[in-house]
Image: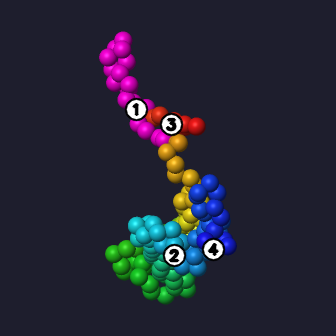
Amino acid sequence: MSDSIVSVNEFDFDPNAPSKAAFYSAILPGLGQAYNKKYWKIPIVYAALGTGIYAYKWNNDNYNRYRDAYKLSINGKPHEFDENSDQFLSDEGLKRAQTQYKEDRDLSLLVTVGLYALQVVEASVNAHLMQMNKGNKLSFNPKFVVDPITNNVGGGLAISFTY
């Protein structure tokens, strides 16, 4: 047994495991989940972060597109949304589209950063929960009860703790 592993009532736990999992996840998203041996969560982490990054890039590209068209329009130069195109937009329409894409870009960045932080927290919490005593004293079971008066079946959950 190493120095960092503590034994309590025949139950070993590593007090550094949650901080290691959080650190690994902060360095490389999904690495904390791999440290916790929850490999099935890694594609979810990358799908969430990839979706956020894709949304940011898509909104940023459209923001730049409408911004450039607006700049060209106020200078009297032709652009992709002028009156000669199928997608005509006035200066006010270009300005509104640019503002909306900028707001969406900023929101997608905020959501992506939130998802990044969430996967770090998830790895740490999972490492904490893996160290819980999983004895048979605490059980959580669904329970179905038949009402003797109406003869209807009702469902519920039963939590039991034995000493």
User: Is disc 1 placed on a helix, strand or loop?
Assistant: strand
Type of amino acid under label 3: Ile
Mark sitting earlier along the chain (3/2): 2
Kind of residue sitting beneath label 1 = Lys
How many residues crowd mark 2 within 10 Å: few (<14), some (14–19), many (20+)?
many
Nearer mark to the viewer, of 2 and 4: 4
Residue type indicated by callout 4: Ser
The span shown in magenta is: 139-156
Q: Is 78 placed above or below 90 here? A: below
Q: Are marks 2 and 1 in contact (CB under 8 Å)?
A: no
Residue at which label 3 appears: 159
Q: Position of residue 130 (x, y in %)?
A: 54, 59
First in sequence, mark 1 or 3: give its number.
Answer: 1
Helix, strand or loop under label 3:
strand
| Residue 31 image offset from top left, x and y in percent | 51, 75
Residue appearing at x 44%, y 84% in the figure: 79
The secondary element bearing badge 2 is classed as helix
Disc 1: which residue: 143
Gap in Å between the C-alphas at discs 4 and 3? 36 Å
Front position among marks 4 and 3: 4
The dot on residue 2 is 4
Q: Calculate the distance from the C-alpha at mark 2 to the C-alpha at mark 4.
A: 23 Å
Label 2 sits on residue: 31
Position of 74 relative to 137 (above/below): below
